Amino acid sequence: MKKIIIPIGAAAAVLAGCSSISTQADQVALHYSGGAIESSTFAGCVDPAKRDWAGPGDAFYVYPASQRNFVFSPAEDADGPAITFVTSDGIEMTVTGVANFDLNVDCTTLQVFHERIGNRYAAHTGDGWNKMLDTYMGIPLDTAVDRAGQAYTYQELYFDPVKKAAWEKAVVESLPELVGRQTDGEEQFFKDFAITLAKPTPPEAVKDALVEQQAAVAKANAAKAQADAQVAAAEAQIAVERANAAQIAEKIKVLGLDGYLRAQAIEAGINPYQPTGTPIIQGEQP
């Protein structure tokens, strides 16, 4: 017969019917004691990177102790869909992004979270956690984005990075209260919120209109620039002519008009000093 070797620790667990938990560095666990003949009772928390043993029938529920996120986008692996909202001028915009937060793993608070929300959704499992987030994070986030977006026009959010940053700030500031309303209690189950919102986009028809508008503005700006250049050139020419006229006036003051004209003739290669006596005809005696 083939001999089966069982490690001492494992053999002890098998013989005693014990359960155990070994948490990772980013996990915390809730320990509930109970079995076939007794009701389940909260026995305490297991800190990150710890190992704990329990009796027969005991249960452990593991929750994250590090930062979590809620991604909203059209991607298949996103936690929720892209969020739509309406601006102050009535344009429906769409935005994607990610909200970061921490689960409050204070032992007492985490126990209340598990017994009020987590156990109902089986939030200690992957699918249960995602379903829980749909309600307790997705809905408040949608509300926060929508409310904050109503304070801005679509062009402010689409073109102005300062306005967009202010909108993003308003969203994250309103999240704790909205999430708290959803969880319906005094305990703060989620904390340390942060959010990153992509540039919101209007419908395609509006985007096309914006492109046309920008093209028209660019054309108008080019025409204005050309007109301004022509005006500037004309003004420069006038200034040159005025300077030349002033220079001529000063020369006339010094030389007199006749002297100025003679000087101009000399400069042009013309002799201004032509003979003025009676001409002598050839063959004629004086």
Image (cartoon, rainbow, N blue to C red):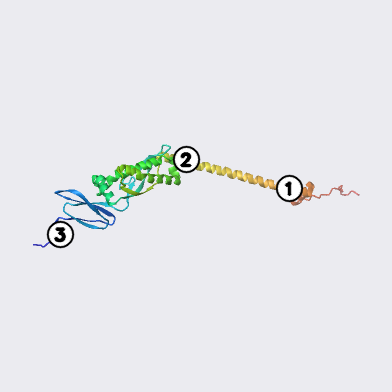
Name which residue type carries label 1: Ile
Q: Position of residue 93 (x, y in %)?
A: 39, 41
- What secondary structure is found at the residue carrying circle 1? helix
Give x and y (percent) for residue 215.
Answer: 48, 42
Closer to the chain start, of discs 1 and 2, is 2
Please, what is the three-letter code of the amino acid marked with disc 3? Answer: Ala
Callout 3 crowding tier (Cα within 10 Å): few <14, some 14–19, many ≥20: few
Quadrant holding the N terminus:
bottom left
- Judge depth for marks 2 and 3 and give the one in front: 3
Q: Nearer the viewer, residue 151 or 186?
A: 186
Q: Which mark is residue 171?
A: none
Per the image, label 2 sits on a secondary structure element best described as helix
Q: Position of residue 162 (x, y in %)?
A: 45, 46
Q: Which of the two residues, 218 or 172, is positioned nearer the viewer here? A: 172
Q: Which mark is residue 12?
A: 3
Is residue 148 rendered to the left or right of residue 258? left
Count numbered badges in the picture: 3
The residue depicted at 33 percent of the width and 47 percent of the height is 71
Name the residue that disc number 1 marks. Answer: 248
Q: Which residue is mark 2?
A: 213
Q: Give the side of residue 173 with respect to residue 265, left or right.
A: left
N-terminal of the pair, mark 2 or mark 3, is: 3
Whether residue 263 is visible, yes or no, is yes
Can you tell which of label 1 and label 3 is closer to the viewer? 3
Query: Residue 109 versus residue 225: which sits nearer the camera?
Result: 109
Which residue is outermost to the left? 1
